[in-house]
Image (spheres, helix red, strand yellow):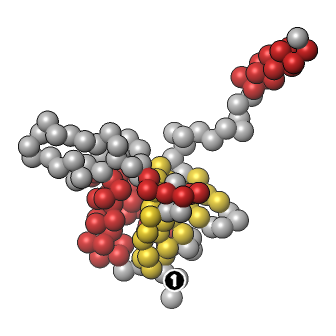
Amino acid sequence: MKNKNKDLEDWIEFIKNPGHLQDKDKTETTSQKKKIFVFDLHGYTLEGANTKVKKIILDCYQKNYKNILLVTGKGLHSNRQDNVFSSKDFNKLKNTVPDFIKNNEDVSSIIKSIKTASKEMGGEGALYITLKSKV
């Protein structure tokens, strides 16, 4: 019975002060230790994601960030087969964002590499971008 009361007390305290939890809706986070800029693109349209990605890359380059982690998701909810003008692969940000970057001169010129993030950083649902150093 003592453990139940302690659990209840802990839960009540947690509900009162959940400040230590990361707010997913907070748009920008950084890890100062590794100088990584992290951004979650869930919920963005293709156009909105491309616009935001370009801004992020250019801003990070100006601020001397070396690495960017873009959380794109795996695209599991992007299987739109009801529209003949829409490709289920084209709807996935994990596929379209790298293509946008490679085909946009403003950002591709400052990119050193783009790869799927390590499993610990999001794996198939995230892109790890390394920027070139400013001259």
Q: Give the answer, above or below, for where 111 lies relative to 87.
A: below
Residue that carries the numbered disc 1 in the rendered image: 134
Q: Give the answer, above or below, for where 8 lies relative to 18.
A: above
Q: Residue at x 51, y 47 (%)?
A: 27
Q: Where is residue 109 drawn, in percent x and y?
A: 36, 80
Q: Where is residue 106 drawn, in percent x and y?
A: 33, 74
Q: Nearer the viewer, residue 78 or 69?
A: 78
Q: Nearer the viewer, residue 80 or 59?
A: 80
* Number of on-image labels: 1
Mark 1 neighbour density, 10 Å: few (under 14) some (14–19) many (20 or more): few
Q: Is residue 43 left or right of residue 66?
A: left
As helix, strand or loop, the secondary structure at mark 1 comes to: loop
Q: Residue at x 68, y 63 (%)?
A: 32
Quarter location, residue 84: top left
Amino acid type for the residue under numbered disc 1 = Lys
Name the image quarter holding the N terminus.
top right
Query: Which residue sits furthest left?
Result: 84
- Work out whether residue 69 can be spotted: no
Q: Where is residue 6 drawn, in percent x and y?
A: 86, 19
